[in-house]
Image (tube, rainbow, N blue to C red):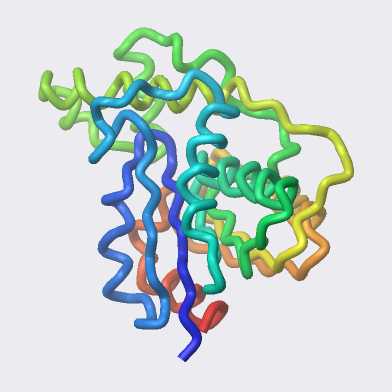
Amino acid sequence: MKRMKLFFLPYAGGSASVFLSWKRSLDQAIDIRPVELAGRGKRICEPLYESMEEAVSDVFSIISKEIDEEEYAIYGHSMGTILAYEVTRKIKATKMKEPEHIFFSGRNSPDTENIFKDMHTLNDNDFIKLISNYGGPNMELFENEEFKTMFLPILRGDFNIVEMYKFQKDHFKLGCNITILNGREDELISFEHMKKWERVTNGSCRFYEFDDGHFFINKYRIEICKIINDTLV
């Protein structure tokens, strides 16, 4: 049986733990490797990233140690799609083995202008309201001061690096096949910009839509895992 490592890269504010439950719905041949970003989970004591470049370098240092003779794939949701794209760019630049497949989930193509502008600088109430509007944590969670004190800096830090991200306008293209997934009701994306994902690779590109918003991955986890299984195994 062919073994396949699958690295998960989380959305803003997310940690490796959000993908652990996916293991139950994935084929046994898929070895899930959720990547823990700095400042959360097991790395809670480490400083948050100050730029997307810093985040990419960190994720690259983690994944590059795991690239061996086994095939591997990457799944990134929202902020994780940028990490997946830029880490693979770095992997290709260093002439390491590219992923077998990349799943880009819940975000427009990387060359799309960022709709977030200095949102990480909003006051707490406005920032929390913004997050909740897009299907983030329930407002009730932020009434817990311990949760608010711990989580808001992480989320602001992630929004900051996403807002500062600059797409490199060159002729770089991925060499692998890709799958694009999105929520039909996601106000953060558009079909026109999602279609542009097919321009970032020389491989094939498949699209899947789900009847939900930005965090469709929670409601449709089983269906997404089936797509992953059918694609990788």
Q: Is residue 90 left or right of residue 204?
A: left
Instruction: Relative to 25, say whether 155 is above or below.
Output: above
Residue 104 x %, y %? 58, 55
Instruction: Relative to 206, say whether 66 is above or below.
Output: above
Identify the residue at image location x=28%, y=35%.
Answer: 43
Q: Is residue 73 left or right of residue 191?
A: left
Image quadrant where residue 142 sits:
top left
**Residue ranking furthest to the bottom:** 1
Total numbered circles: 0
Compare residues 104 and 95 and report the one nearer the observer. Answer: 95
Compare residues 43 and 95 and report the one nearer the observer. Answer: 95
Identify the residue at image location x=37%, y=55%.
Answer: 34
Residue 15 x %, y %? 32, 43
Image quadrant where residue 223 sits:
bottom left
Compare residues 6 and 190 and report the one nearer the observer. Answer: 6
Identify the residue at image location x=70%, y=26%.
Answer: 166
Instruction: Relative to 77, say whether 222 is above or below.
Output: below
Residue 53 x %, y %? 60, 28
**Residue ranking furthest to the right:** 171
Identify the residue at image location x=73%, y=32%.
Answer: 167
Residue 170 x %, y %? 87, 38
Compare residues 33 and 62 and report the one nearer the observer. Answer: 62
